[in-house]
Image: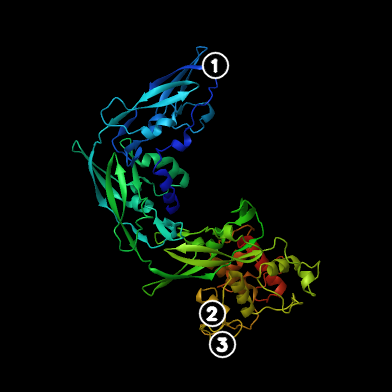
Amino acid sequence: MKKLKRILCALLAVVFLSGLIPQSAVFAADNGGAAVERLEIVENDYKYVENDLSSGWFSEDGFHYDPFISFIYLKLRATYADGSTKEFSFFDKDGNFIEDIDSEDYPSIDVSNVGECLWEVGTTENAYTVVYGGASVSVPVTVIESLVEKIDIIENNYVYIKNDRAESFTVADEQGNETVVYLPDNSLLGLRLRIYFKNGDTEDFCLGDKIPADCTDEEFSSLAEEMLMLNGYAFTYSAYDQEQNPWTVGGSNSYIVSYMGVSVDVPVKIVESPVIGISVVENPFKYTMNDDRLGQTVGGEYGDEFFKYDETYSFAYSLFKIDYSDGTFEYYRPVKSDGFNLHNGYEFVVGTPDQFEKPWTEGENSCTICYMGKEVVIPVTVVSSVPVDSSSVFTDVGAGRWYKPYIDEAVTYGLFNGVTKTTFVPGGEMNRAMFVQVLANMSGVKTDKNAETGFKDVSVGRWYTGAVAWAAQFGIVNGISETEFAPLSNVTREQMCTMLVRYADHVGVELQKDVAVKTFADDADISKYAKDAVYACQQAGIIDGMTETEFAPKDTATRAQVAKILSVFHFSYMS
């Protein structure tokens, strides 16, 4: 919903359609070359409200009314020299705005007198001029007194977070001094107003009440004009003096809401962020160089083109630790959240201009996100679109062996490397510590070998200690008992499946059922705790039996077999 709200700033002035209306002097009339002899008014029903900010603006000279507001409601008829006629209107017979108007063949306002529209209530001298094809017509304008006596604030509960980029932006003056400018959109959505009319009636208005809970961006855009209207007139707001009077924590902050020429000052509360820090715990997603599924080519700051990657992929799978000022903390992974980038009512801002300033290249890069006024840098890895040729790196990986493409994938994406710089040992065994380390590598975890694991057989300082501690903390491993992990015991096939399914759940991946389920002949040999995981991996196409009929749950796996299992998982779900 926050994304919908951010559209509001542009849509609040939806009646200001001047950008869609031709404003140049005279366009050529397209009617077979015939000249326009006469331009007439067919309908002219729009009435301005005195000092209504939805249809004009204040200046030192007085209140300037925007003639384009009347113009878009105007229906005109042009009579050509050959006797033919043509009618012009910005709305169809059902009252819908016509978006595909040909501005090259349409009447326009004579802009020479736009600055003179200081119209008054009750006078017959209010008018502006429309020209077309050499003909012109003076359009009379009616300005009425406001029907509104006053506006009261009934509810105003929204609280801004200092420097929250989701609802603010930074501007700099000529000296480079920066000011944070806050957008009133979110405050306005929760603001409840009571309108007192001069005839004694009252009516409550809250924009947020008009937005359906399941409203999409497209629906919000199409409904915006209607939602901002009351009795045919639009609500507007003004918060444009923040560069001169910045909003501050504890300051006398406010913006103006106006309706039918009557305004009310809306107080704004800004508080310090309750977040004191954000850190990236896991960052499993890796980008492939110039992959069109992950970004697109765009123009750079100086006209040069570069490939811009979509940062939301890295953001979605990352695991964040959010520390609060009250001493509490929580973990947050967007892909596992119903709100995705909306958390506790506030938005993670993703898609900073980092790439425009420094385009990503193959290797290590970064992007910045902001939540509740605090920023965090996410490490980003871009790998070559050409996989590593493992047979040219490792002397024991043959070019034609079945496992070569899987080792290529595993090494390209940094899942695991060789035993030495020149040997992979594809037939070598993999123990439980190695397998957990590979999962940590896949998640992009910075492990701490001095971490406490809770297992008496995993000593502090071992190369695998940090990975075991991480996996135990997040429920990926439970150990062979409450106190033992057996790190150097060979990992069995059913143990691999169990850890991998728990890992998938941990990172927010839902394993698909792409392969028909089969019942293995040795199903009874599969441990009860592992059975669901074994068949989940089998149906996902990640693993199959050692033979057509047997799974061999207690068999150990070679490094080549693990490379295949994890490469298939990574390719299918994490890239």
Give the vertical position of 279 relative to 163 (above or below).
below
Q: Which residue is mark 3?
A: 459
Question: Element type at marker 2?
Answer: helix
The residue under the point 44% across, 21% down is 136
Q: Is 313 left or right of 344, judged from the image as shown?
A: right
Q: Quadrant of the C terminus?
A: bottom right
The residue under the point 46% across, 59% down is 175
Q: Disc 1 to disc 2, how far (Cα)?
A: 85 Å
Q: Is 221 left or right of 141, judged from the image as shown?
A: right
Q: Amino acid at mark 1?
A: Ala
Q: Nearer the viewer, residue 518 or 474?
A: 474
Give the vertical position of 145 relative to 192 (above or below).
above
Q: Which residue is mark 1?
A: 34
Q: Amino acid at mark 3?
A: Ser
Q: Which mark is residue 469?
A: 2
Q: Is residue 508 visible?
A: no
Q: Disc 1 to disc 3, how far (Cα)?
A: 94 Å
The mark nearer the N terminus, 1 or 3, is 1
What crowding class fits label 1: few (fewer than 14 Cα within 10 Å), some (14-19), or many (20 or more)?
Answer: some
The mark nearer the N terminus, 3 or 2, is 3
Give the vertical position of 115 relative to 513 (above or below).
above
Q: Disc 3 to disc 2, how far (Cα)?
A: 11 Å
Residues tagged 3 and 2 counted as in contact (Cβ below 8 A): no
